[in-house]
Image (spheres, helix red, strand yellow):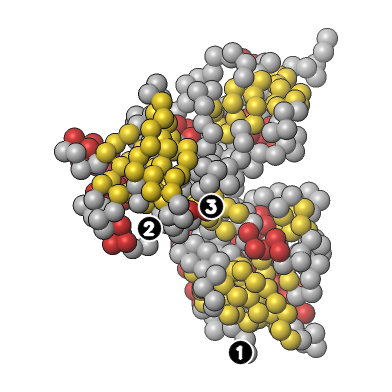
Amino acid sequence: MEKTADILIIGAGPVGLFTVFEAGLLKMTCHLVDSLAEPGGQLTEIYPKKPIYDIPGYPTVLAGELVDKLMEQIAPFKPTFTLGERAELLEKVGDKMYKVTTSKGTELFAPVVAIAGGLGSFEPRKPPIPNIVEFEDKGVDYIIKDPEKFRGKKVLIAGGGDSALDWSILLADIASELTLIHRRTSFRGALDSVDKVMELAQEGKINLITNAQATKLHGNGQVDGISVIVDNEGEKIVPIDNFIPLFGLSPKLGPIGDWGLEIENNAIIVDTKDYSTNIDGVYAIGDVNTYEGKLKLILCGFHEGTIMVQSAFKYIYPDQKLSFKYTTVAGVNGF
Amino acid sequence: MSVENDNIITLTVIDREDKPHLLQAPTDMAMNLMEVCKSYELPVEGTCGGMALCASCHVYVESDHDLPEPSEDEENMLDQAFFVQENSRLGCQIKMTDEKEGLVVHLAPVGE
């Protein structure tokens, strides 16, 4: 059982990232885990191109740019990452040692765990089709990992965004039949993709059904059809082998909710003295925590991470006198 | 003379258990319906902070107010929402202005 880092940060959003800097000033190493494949959390996943106006010193900064700057700022402290894996389990495995196990079975060890999980991990939005859960992995996929899986199959994609359009174009050549359904007639997404889909629909390579929604899956242990309701036309059953709903991602608190932490309204209750939770050595910072007067702002999360690492240092090294450092004196000295 | 009622409108928000809530909202703070719901601690997530990027403030407009047409961004986001109806809107795109006096909205169900 080798220590992965001094602090294991769950969530690589802006608050998790900046905490690496503050920990680094105290010579503590950090490892970050995130269910998304890229660092940045919501900023990368939901609004990379949107300006943020309340970061001190930046009258305006694009969310994606802020993430890039944070990555640059923490680089001297050589953070390590486990990306694309969701933190599933938290176990105490020794005196001042926790083990976090990810969705892919990766085991990470650290004396301190800082949960900077934002609103949770991003999961595909599941359409409200009552029996969809029983067909998951039996013809229903929310994420396309290997397009070859759909070769020669009858596939129905639902959604109107870029991913629905792009996958429809790609799978039109692979699937034996490709149907795309969408709740209205116009599509968002890149104009090129929209044009291409329309072209393929005219050529008969994509069966396009608009003003429509899927309501029920059919099959005996494996999907073999889907009910589609079309405005003013009523319901029809489309025979399919695979259903791929692509409605984007939304955050869910997920497994963190089962770690024995005190939770209120989907957020972890912390002591504002140091943002510690009810579990020794486990902290919660940023949007994932709650306390009297809490504001879900990036800037407040930066503060919380800064205060938190002071407490984490004292927890890990109770006998060492902490020397708080001003970066103005000696700059930033990496590892 | 009632100074405190200036720039205040009253709205009704019906929650997902069909319980109506009477809310008062200022019209001079550039607020939107999502923010007003959150300040009254109604169960509206507002994940993206009001940028029409998450659909977590999806509501049905039940009064016959003549609201500005949804923008393309709002329509695009409604594509990712579920239980979308003719009267679906994103709360974050409904600005608190005098014309919204008496507005009635119902919070849409939250998908999985």
Relative to B26, residue A168 above or below: below
Marks 1/3: CA–CA distance: 39 Å
Point 38% across, 48% down: residue: A224
Query: Dot 3 lies on which element?
Result: helix
Chain letter for the residue marked with disc 2 in the picture: A
Residue marked by disc 1: A2
How far across and how far down the image is residue A180, in percent?
Answer: 33, 41
Q: Is residue A25 visible to us here?
A: no
Question: Label 1 amino acid?
Answer: Glu
Q: Residue at x 38, y 32 (%)?
A: A236
How many other residues sit within 10 Å of disc 1, few (<14), some (14-19) or many (≥20)?
few
Tell me which amino acid carries mark 2.
Answer: Ile
Please tell me which of labels 1 and 3 falls first in the chain.
Answer: 1
Q: Secondary structure beneath disc 2?
A: loop
Q: Which quarter of the figure is the N terminus of chain A placed in?
A: bottom right
Which class describes the residues within 10 Å of circle 2: few (<14), some (14-19), or many (20+)? few
Residue B33 vertical position relative to residue A53 in the rendered view, above or below: above
Q: Position of residue A166 (x, y in %)?
A: 30, 49
Q: Earlier in the sequence, mark 2 or mark 1?
A: 1
Given the image, what chain letter belongs to the residue carrying mark 3?
A
Residue A208 position in % (x across, y down): 29, 36
Quadrant in which the C terminus of chain A is drawn: bottom right
Which element is circle 1 on?
loop
Rounded to the nearest whole Å, what is the CA distance between mark 2 and mark 3?
Answer: 17 Å
* Residue behind mark 2: A144
Q: Quadrant of residue A322?
A: bottom right
**Closer to us: mark 1 or mark 3?**
3
With A173 as the anchor, is A238 left or right in this view? right
Residue A173 image label: none
Mark 3 highlights which residue?
Answer: A133
Q: Residue at x 67, y 50 (%)?
A: A296
Q: Residue at x 71, y 22 (%)?
A: B12
